[in-house]
Image (cartoon, helix red, strand yellow):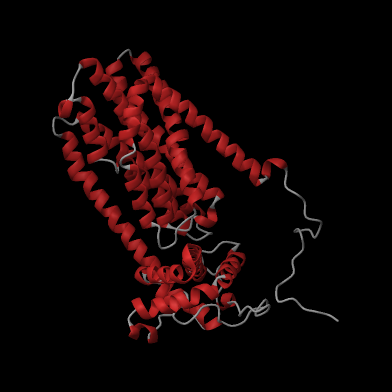
Amino acid sequence: MATSSAYPTYSLSPGGDVLRHPHWWQRRAVRYGALITLLALSGLVILALVRRQTGTEGFLVGLGLAMLPVPWLIAAFRWLDRVAPGPWRNLIFAFAWGACAAALIAIVANSFATKWIATATADPASADTLGATVIAPIVEESAKAAAVLLVFLFRRRDFTGIVDGMVIAGITATGFAFTENILYLGTAFGADQLSGDRGIASVTAATFFVRIVMSPFAHPLFTTMTGLGFGFSAFSAQRQRARRVLLPICGLLLAMSMHSLWNSSSTFGEFGFFAVYGCFMVPVFGLLTWLAIWTRQRELRTVREELPAYVLAGWLGPAEPFALASMRARRAARDYARHHGGKPAAREMARYDAYATSLALLRRRGRQGKAGADFVAGERRLLDELWKRKDLARPALEYAARAAVPVRAAYRPVYAGPAPVPTAYGPGYGYPAVPYSTYNPYRS
């Protein structure tokens, strides 16, 4: 008796031959092991270098003080990423790269370049100034940008837009600033120990006020420009190759320029630092904060506009697009799941929110002609993940829609795109039809 599968059949390889196993260096375990080893070795070397320069006591003081802004900065970037949160492993990698690899590259390269310039010009004072205003911004921003580039290339599925670029760049810069603050604060403490200064007039107090109180966001602000470049590149269409390459480069150059201006502020006179801080850093920080909030609201609007296509196809319940487009409703759904199924149910509900948001963003890119070659596989994967959790998620989201979304909104859906129709691999094995064939993600 012949049977037909609801899914299309594909050959094992482009040539129809037997699928070949990857080489040993292409295996995931090998790649992860090499990356962890690299970061661990970088961390040990940077630890030894900083401790040698600050001393044990200065290192411990610097470590304790440098830790203070880290939780707040990470929490701010995680809040920004709440609509479609990326995996923690990307953030851990970004922080570790900034704190270990990027910091090591910066210390070695900056020291070498400054000494070479001092030797070549026989003017150590001008070498230090040139190193701080030119060499350091180029080296440090390039080292931090490497983390964003690696996530962009090897975790492309998790890097889909502006927010992802800002978060990865910001977390990387937070790690870098953490290590740099240990060095500066530990060195300042050592100077106070030698001079006998104590209290608020000490070098440690002044360094703490400038770096931890007034400008903990400085490095994240610079590197966020690089992240924006990669974010806009990820959001560009596949055929716009020049734009996809030039945008990250422009973002990196802007980050270097801002970093250079910030480091040059001490050379602008007695009030140069406060002038740059008040007239440039604060407005740019406010502008980026507005952009981040606007982008977050735009993602929620995309969820509300794109997911009704999957409601009509039977993949989602009628109330889900409206509940998923409201952060208040999402919280209510997680509380409902936690009340009825405990913390594991709440975690699954959070994963459902993330998969649904990723699906909406993917469909929007498809309608705009910006989807990649893996669009169909990505859509199917996300739909399968949602379908696995529908029994848990639907009651929670229906409750949340009634509790948090205005009643009239449930009868006024916003829908972008034509009504879906079954595809060649349409309903089967209990699944509804997939609405992919209603649009062409590669249209010009």
| Whether residue 103 is visible | yes
Residue 331 against residue 222 in the figure, above or below: below
> In this view, which residue lies farthest toward the right?
1
Towards the viewer: 383 or 250: 383
Rendered-image quadrant of the N terminus: bottom right
Residue 58 against residue 80 in the figure, above or below: above
Relative side of 17 to 180, left or right: right
Q: Position of residue 110 (x, y in %)?
A: 39, 26
| Whether residue 226 is visible | no
> In this view, which residue lies farthest toward the left?
270
Q: Residue at x 67, y 45 (%)?
A: 27
Q: Position of residue 11 (x, y in %)?
A: 77, 63
Relative side of 387 to 223, left or right: right
Towards the viewer: 55 or 32: 55
Q: Residue at x 37, y 81 (%)?
A: 402
The tally of labels here is 0
Q: Position of residue 160 (x, y in %)?
A: 48, 58
Residue 274 falls in image quadrant: top left
Residue 144 falls in image quadrant: top left
Q: Residue at x 53, y 54 (%)?
A: 156
Q: Position of residue 172 (x, y in %)?
A: 42, 43
Q: Residue at x 80, y 60 (%)?
A: 16
